[in-house]
Image (cartoon, rainbow, N blue to C red):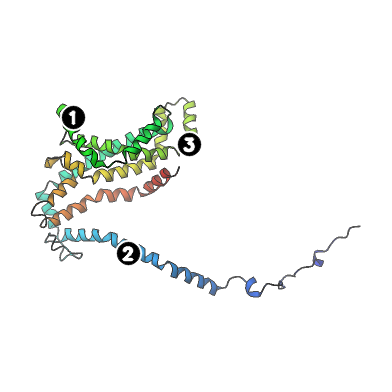
Amino acid sequence: MSTAINPSDAVGPQDGAPVAGVTDEESSPPSASRTRMVGQRRGTGTWWRHLLVWVAIAWSLFPIVFILSAALNPAGTLATSNLIPSGFSLENWRELFETRPYWTWYRNALVISLVATAGAVFIGACAAYAFSRLRFTGRRPGLLALLLVQMFPALLTFVALYFTMVRVGEIIPAIGLNTSLGLILVYLGGAMGANIWLLKGYFDTVPRELDEAATIDGASHARIFFTMTLRLVAPILVTVAMLAFVQFWGEFMLASIFLKDADAQTLGVGLWQMQQGNEKNAQFGEFAAGALLASIPVVVLYLVFQRQLVSGLTSGSVK
């Protein structure tokens, strides 16, 4: 015969009764003083991180402040340039615009950088899509060859590129030496390896089921690429475009070799020539003013597309 057990008759600690072996301090919730002590220990352990951040910010702002001070210095020389200018004047900018073809250099650099960036992104995206989605003979050796080419220094190709463009210019003068189009073609050839690998890594993250569904509906590879895939990989396209633009905008070696006329030179080559000769000390103020204006496009691009840049780099690097 079973007997029901009343819950009140169960053996155990009653509500509010102390538990054997557990003190009041251990069973009580953490006090406010203990919370304050933990917060103080955390604060004392992270102060050096904040100090390191402020030191890094000051270190990175130092050259910018110095260049700005030199550009605003009315004396305009390297010897009189200090971190805090002795006066404020726009004389260096006036001399730069009146005595130098600065805006011609600026326009040449902007046109070459934009056209080369658009070409590098388009060609790289097409090649990355082929390596990611299509299966053909030589696919893997082609990827390895692109990776192998990136291991050699770019200086090894300068002599070969120079003689190649000399011969090409004899046949087609429009793309030979001392032409913007010829320099753009050289830029496109050198920007393919790293861009294709970065783009391919992002293309691999796009589900293949989307391509298969579009293929069943009758879409071709070209239609899938232009109408669907490019929209899905927009962050990496922006990332590659920014990296390519910054590279082309600040490129100096190839531009100094292929462009000789003053009206065809880019901004980097023109500013470099201002620091050659016996008057480089006296022209430092003009050089600083030109360098400040040259940094505007890159800063604007990073501020506008910084979210896409971070998304493209992180997603394209994770497989």
Tag 2 residue: 55
| Residue depicted at x 51% and y 70% | 38
Mark 3: few, some, or many residues within 10 Å (few <14, many ≥20)?
few
Residue 251 image label: none
Identify the mark nearer the N-term, 2 or 1. Answer: 2
Work out whether 159 lies above or below 219.
below
Q: Residue 30 in the image: x percent, y percent? A: 58, 71
> Residue 224 versus residue 139: which sits nearer the camera?
139
Q: Secondary structure at mark 2?
A: helix
Q: Separation of disc 1 and disc 3 at Cα?
A: 43 Å
> Residue 160 versus residue 197: which sits nearer the camera?
160
Closest to the camera, between mark 3 and mark 2, is 2
Q: How many marks?
A: 3
Residue 168 image label: 1
Q: Residue 175 in the image: x percent, y percent? A: 19, 32
| Residue depicted at x 11% and y 54% | 280
Can residue 235 be seen by looking at this rendering? yes
Relative side of 160 to 151, left or right: left
Q: Separation of disc 3 and disc 2 at Cα?
A: 44 Å
Q: Secondary structure at mark 1?
A: helix
